[in-house]
Amino acid sequence: MPIFDDAVTNEVALEETLSQLADQYGPDTFKRLLHSLLPSNNTESMKRYEELLLEDAVPHYFASDAFQSLANSSQQAYRYEMDLFLRYCRRLKGTNPSITEVSSAVFLTEYLAPVQKLNTRSKKSAFLRSFLGEIFSHFFNRDIGKLKRTLSIEIDRNREPRAFTKEQLDELLCHVRLGREAHRNFTILWTFLGSGIRLSELLYLQIRDIVSSRQEILVRGKGKKGYKQPSKITKSALDILNVYVNFRYHGVKNEQDYLERFIFSDDKGKSPLHESTIQKMFASLIDETSSIPKSDKKPYQLSVHSLRHSFALYLLESGVNLYTIKELMRHSWLSSTEVYLKLFDSMLVTAIDQHPLAQLKASDLF
């Protein structure tokens, strides 16, 4: 799943802008002017804050624009995080706590304290910012304010992307041919490797999205509901995709809804595969692949998304420049593409150590 949605990124940018304005004009002046723009019925707001129950806040959040505007993958991730948060709240505060009891800086700090990994903590903070931000805004006409310091969002920039070696990819492609739904799963694998698209983008591919004349497929970009953008695909992957579509849907070519059908589907193209179907299939392939170390078979190591990293890494290894890779990956910022330089550098170190002269020791020469 992606770490953040565009809405979260915008919120962080807005917070930084407001902090700069506070520094420029002074915190007291900035705070006074900001409060003058907000409704002044603080007594009524505090009363609602003390009385609102968590069980009433949750269904409102799931029905709100703040949640509905998220990408499908983010919605699923936030539902999972909500379930974890509710269990924690009920264990410490009883079966039906109020928002007051579960939204203090102390309580939230204790909730996040056991989380050691920076990226995992940031994901949980992003969810809590979205949830509490919507509840505070709708019910109390307030911002979550100082809670943002507790719910800080930081990305581990030193974490290298995980990619498959060429030997591992060869073995994965061998195993996928021998499994159930071999033709479909082989095509899925090649589509990932030939285009670098994300799992959520592959799921919603429709027959109409294949544009063979321009050697591209149209995908729903990250955080862009309903909006499709072109993504280039290798000639071999495009051929494999077209062969699969022709094989699978040849019998319904004359149907009115032919172009609307989802390419990868369990119900004749009426709805897309569930992401868990592909994740489980791929986890099984990884488990079968002997060239993948056991340590890399653990959760959150190598995954479906590693195919996207592999796509970028081998472009870089082939001499394609970063700016071109950025466009092929459809990254908004070059910094998102530059992370592959770290992984590529480690590949170069491995390669240079394989040089025959690298095996010589200085003591052998003097």
Image (cartoon, rainbow, N blue to C red):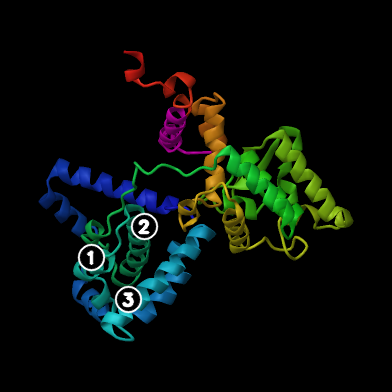
Q: Main secondary structure of the magenta part?
A: helix
Q: Residues within 10 Å of mark 1 (few under 14, many from 20)?
A: some
* Callout 3 amino acid: Tyr
Disc 3 target residue: 88
- Cα–Cα span, label 2 and label 1: 14 Å
- Which quadrant: the C terminus? top left
As drawn, the residue found furthest toward the top would be: 366
Q: Position of residue 209 (x, y in %)?
A: 70, 46
Q: Residues within 10 Å of mark 3 (few under 14, many from 20)?
A: some
Disc 2 target residue: 120
Q: Position of residue 95 (x, y in %)?
A: 33, 86
Q: Is residue 21 visible?
A: yes
- Cα–Cα span, label 3 and label 2: 17 Å
* Callout 2 amino acid: Thr
Q: Counting residues from the N terminus, which is met first, the one under dot 2 or under dot 1?
A: 1
Disc 1 target residue: 109
Residue lying at 71% horizontally and 58% vertically, measured from the top left: 179
Q: Position of residue 181 (x, y in %)?
A: 74, 59
Q: Which mark is residue 294?
A: none
Secondary structure found at label 1: helix
Q: Could you say which is closer to the camera, residue 175 or residue 230?
A: 175
Residue lying at 79% horizontally and 49% vertically, measured from the top left: 244
Q: Counting residues from the N terminus, which is met first, the one under dot 3 or under dot 1?
A: 3
Residue lying at 75% horizontally and 66% vertically, measured from the top left: 267
* Callout 1 amino acid: Thr
**The magenta stretch spans which residues?**
330-350
